[in-house]
Image (cartoon, rainbow, N blue to C red):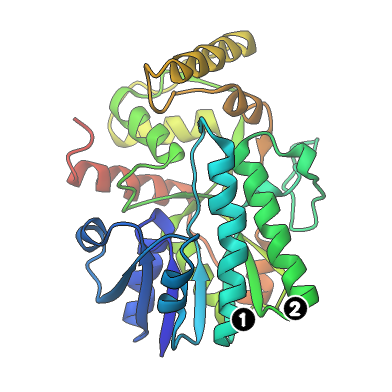
């Protein structure tokens, strides 16, 4: 059975490829760099070179496929040209969905994010019905994901697109080769104990649980319905403390005041605009995001899909041990 996947070399995508391969799927993957993809993905995959704005590559990748998993996205905290992110995340998604309809793909799982959902002011876990608007989207990435999900939802209603939407929270675990922004925080706190922390919180899920949730959404999800694929809601201080204990480091001790965070974000953006750093540690958008506790509930996915998640500690342990095996802790 043929399945097409975008984002196969990403953190969630690479773990999903492993699951699909074990289930006996023939996997076709759209990738920018075949050589790099072959180094990162060890499972048997038919790689097609191209990107989300390459019409002929999309047609080739989708040909003969019954299912589609769309995970690829431009995910950066800092981007000098937000329009390039919009072209990839929004217009690329639109083109891919149209091509999937033309090819007669029977079922699609579109990977959105919890970042497009609202947060509860009292810090309680939000669900799939938490309202938000594009004006609530703080960063170019969040805005692009909000608009891309809107494209998918509109095509479900107006064109019969057979898509299920999943909203992963924060994936943590093995295979984070880039690493992701959260993986970078785990890696740094494993190295030095995460001495400084912000008063914020996030939902942490093992990447393998999120990847399996994608397959469950394909098998059991309702067309046009959202499913949060999450894990444990924990404070950033507790995340750093977990990581520090694993590597026997002292752990977090100092809460960073808001004004210091804003100064760091401002400085990071100035350095990036001057070309002195490529990926600033903090930006104004990341500081604004850190002012909220981004807690979520996976109850709908648990009830309707049979989704389960392991403790956040296990996700962090597996991430740290993988970083150690890759000699990234040095």
Residue 169 in view, yes or no:
no
Say above or below: 266 vs 191.
Answer: above
Where does residue 125 sit, x and y in percent of width and height?
Answer: 72, 47
Residue 47, image x, y percentages = 30, 71
Q: Nearer the viewer, residue 131 or 210?
A: 131
Mark 1 and mark 2 in contact? Answer it, CB < 8 Å. yes
Q: In this view, does 293 lie to the left or right of 51?
A: right
Q: Above or below — where is 2 with respect to 46?
A: below
Residue at 38% x, 35% y: name it: 184
Label whose residue precedes the other's in the sequence (1 or 2): 1
- Nearer-the-camera pick, 272 or 196: 272
Q: What element carries label 2?
A: helix
Q: Looking at the picture, how far across and down is residue 300, in whole percent? A: 70, 67
Looking at the rendering, in which quadrant would you find the C terminus?
A: top left
Q: Quadrant of residue 301?
A: bottom right
Query: Could you say which disc has been placed on residue 114 in the image?
Result: none
- Which residue has dot 1 on it? 101
Characterize the local packing of mark 1: few (<14), some (14-19) or many (20 or more) Cα atoms within 10 angstroms.
some
| Picture disc at residue 159 | 2
| As drawn, 166 above or below 59 | above
* Residue at 59% from the left image edge and 83% from the top image edge: 102
Mark 2 neighbour density, 10 Å: few (under 14) some (14–19) many (20 or more) = few
Residue located at (59% from left, 41% from top): 83
Asked whether residue 312 is in view, the answer is yes
Mark count: 2
């Amino acid at each position: 059975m043929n399945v097409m996947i975008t984002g196969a070399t990403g953190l969630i995508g690479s773990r999903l490829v492993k699951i699909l391969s074990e289930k006996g799927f023939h996997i076709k993957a759209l990738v920018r760099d075949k050589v790099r993809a072959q180094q990162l993905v060890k499972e048997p995959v038919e790689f097609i070179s191209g990107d989300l704005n390459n019409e002929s590559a999309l047609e080739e990748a989708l040909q003969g496929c019954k299912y589609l998993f769309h995970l690829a996205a431009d995910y950066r905290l800092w981007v000098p040209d937000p329009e390039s992110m919009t072209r990839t995340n929004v217009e690329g998604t639109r083109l891919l969905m149209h091509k999937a309809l033309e090819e007669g793909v029977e079922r699609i799982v579109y990977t959105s994010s919890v970042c497009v959902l609202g947060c509860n002011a009292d810090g309680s876990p939000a669900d799939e019905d938490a309202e938000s608007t594009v004006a609530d989207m703080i960063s170019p990435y969040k805005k692009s994901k909000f608009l891309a999900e809107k494209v998918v939802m509109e095509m479900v209603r107006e064109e019969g697109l057979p898509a299920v939407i999943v909203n992963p929270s924060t994936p943590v675990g093995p295979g984070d080769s880039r690493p992701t922004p959260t993986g970078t925080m785990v890696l740094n706190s494993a190295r030095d104990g995460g001495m400084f922390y912000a008063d914020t919180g996030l939902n942490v899920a093992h990447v393998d649980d999120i990847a399996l949730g994608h397959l469950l959404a394909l098998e059991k999800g309702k067309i046009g319905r959202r499913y949060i694929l999450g894990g444990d809601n924990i404070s950033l201080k507790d995340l750093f403390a977990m990581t520090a204990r694993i590597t026997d480091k002292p752990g977090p001790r100092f809460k960073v005041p808001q004004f210091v965070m804003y100064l760091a974000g401002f400085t990071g953006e100035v350095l990036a605009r001057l070309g002195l750093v490529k990926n600033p540690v903090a930006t104004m958008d990341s500081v604004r995001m850190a002012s909220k506790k981004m807690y979520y509930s996976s109850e709908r996915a648990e009830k309707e899909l049979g989704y389960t998640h392991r403790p956040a500690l296990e996700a962090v342990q597996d991430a740290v041990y993988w970083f150690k095996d890759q000699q990234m802790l040095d």
